[in-house]
Image (spheres, helix red, strand yellow):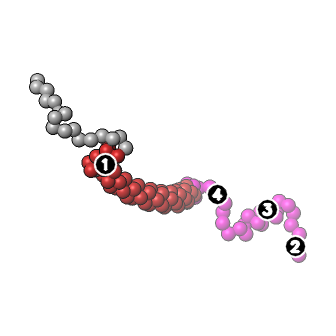
Amino acid sequence: MILLQPGRLLASLHNEWPFKLRLSLWSAIITALFVGCMVSALAVVATSHMTRTQFAQLQQLEQEKNQLQTEWGQLLLEEGAWSTPARIEQIATQRLGMRIPDVHDVEVIRP
């Protein structure tokens, strides 16, 4: 076993280390590109998630729109059934006691 002094220990580790730890322009560029790739990958994931969420919401809203259109069509048919002239005349005679005027009761006003 070899005992080394503290100064010699650092020198021997420095000589044995396979990589020189120095900051160069290429390492800064590679690090920046790696960080940019990670940021863009996270942005793609976030965008995909938001797209799927909004598409599911769109599908739900379209289904609700179809249901409301069906209900609107049914309400229009019901309105047409309730507002037929024969039904209005029947209600007028039964509930309000109205009748069609006789020919003698009609007065014509000339302008």
At 73% from the left edge and 64% from the top edge, which residue is drawn? 14
Closest to the observer: 25 or 69? 69
Q: Which mark is residue 10?
A: 3
For mark 4, what is the residue? Answer: 22
As displayed, is residue 101 above or below residue 86? above
SS of the residue under disc 1: helix
At 48% from the left edge and 57% from the top edge, which residue is drawn? 57
SS of the residue under disc 3: helix
- Report the mark closest to the observer, 4 or 3: 4
- C-alpha separation, residue under disc 1 versus residue under disc 2: 119 Å
Asked if the magenta segment contains residue 23, the reply would be yes
- Which corner quadrant holds the C terminus? top left
- C-alpha separation, residue under disc 2 versus residue under disc 4: 29 Å
The disc labelled 2 sits on which kind of residue?
Ile
Q: Are marks 1 and 3 in contact (CB under 8 Å)?
A: no
- C-alpha separation, residue under disc 2 versus residue under disc 3: 14 Å
Q: In the shown orientation, is residue 6 left or right of residue 83?
A: right
